[in-house]
Image (cartoon, grey):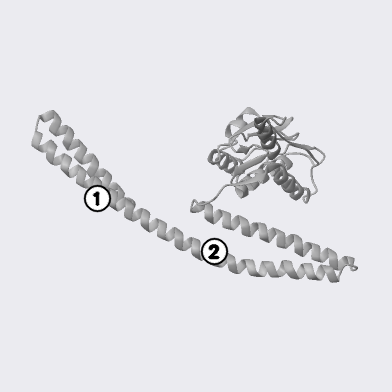
Amino acid sequence: MKKEMWFFILINVFLMAMVLYGFFSGDINLIINTLMALVGVLIMGFAFNSYLLGRKHKVDEEVLHLSREILHELAIPLSTIQANSLLLKRTCHNNEKSLKRLGRIEDASRRLERLYAELIYSINKEIHIVERETFNLARLIEERIEVMHLFKRNEFIVKLEATNVLVDKIGFEKMLDNILSNAMKYSSKESPIVVTLKDAMLSIQDYGVGMDEWELINIYNRYYQSQNNNQGEGIGLALVRAYCIDEKIDINIKSKKGKGTEVILNLHQISLPNEIDMIQRDNHVKGKD
């Protein structure tokens, strides 16, 4: 299909050249005939482009339908595991060893449930139908930090102000996990990580190895790896930045070698008024303050 597109482009370039030639040579008939041909080619190009977009939309719909059927089938055994582990937990409440095993099963099922949600998200994002939703960001941050505690690494110092946002939630979770994972990866276990959310500004501060100016310049390059880390593909912060651009979140990274790194997210474009603020504002308008 790329060949066909190039064919239309070359014809347009040729016809434009003929129009210019007719203009400079004073041949009116050549100009008129060429313009008519150019209009005809543009109409054909529009029809061809509409045909390609229609086919793409049809393929996307078929892929989405097939994916939903497969994911529905996956959800059934997952629900069965969760339901039966809950029933077993009620009958084994005095057996410590069995409870530990059931705890591992529950953790694994929750992990599968999250992977299931992320798979649906990835499919929808590829087809460009991901919807934004409103949620309490402070609560989400607390949940993700609880997950990070499972790694039994750094202590988290958390200062969170209630903040409602309208944004792609699963994408935000993945972006946040990436930043928190980096903060832990480049810090010693004894070093705390400070997470602050205030006035629609989210700050994640670590006191780890930090970065020099050269590393800061290259940090968003998709396959760049810091000299402090040779694991992974080096695409984490590139994906973080891509998400922030899509959601109109300003991201700023401050770092000093040997001192640590601070990632600052300006959330003003996605933040919503808190319910308490809205109630107070309504009361003020009604003269009830």
Left or right side of 273 for 41: left
Displayed quadrant of residue 211: top right
Please tell me which of labels 2 and 1 falls first in the chain: 1
Inspect the image, locate mark 1, and give the three-letter code of the amino acid beneath it: Met
Image location (x, y in percent) of residue 2? 33, 51
Image location (x, y in percent) of residue 158? 77, 38
- Residue placed farthest to the right in the image? 94
Does residue 122 sit above or below 34 in this rendering? below
Instruction: Name the disc covering residue 273, or none.
Output: none
Does residue 159 sit above or below 57 in this rendering? above
Image location (x, y in percent) of residue 148? 75, 48
The residue nearer to you, when weighing 227 against 10, is: 10
Image location (x, y in percent) of residue 10? 25, 44
Q: How many marks?
A: 2
Left or right side of 208 for 7: left
Does residue 71 sit above or below 283 in this rendering? below
Does residue 145 sit above or below 108 in this rendering? above
Instruction: Name the disc covering residue 68, or none.
Output: 2
Inspect the image, locate mark 2, and give the three-letter code of the amino acid beneath it: Arg
Judge the density around disc 2: few (<14), some (14-19), many (≥20) Cα neighbours within 10 Å.
some
Residue tagged by mark 1? 44
The residue nearer to you, when weighing 252 against 167, is: 167
Displayed quadrant of residue 114: bottom right
Quadrant placement of the C terminus: top right
Name the residue located 70 percent from the left edge and 46 percent from the top edge.
Answer: 140
Name the residue located 13 percent from the left edge and 36 percent from the top edge.
Answer: 31
Which type of secondary structure does the marked residue at label 2 adopt? helix
The residue nearer to you, when weighing 17 against 81, is: 81
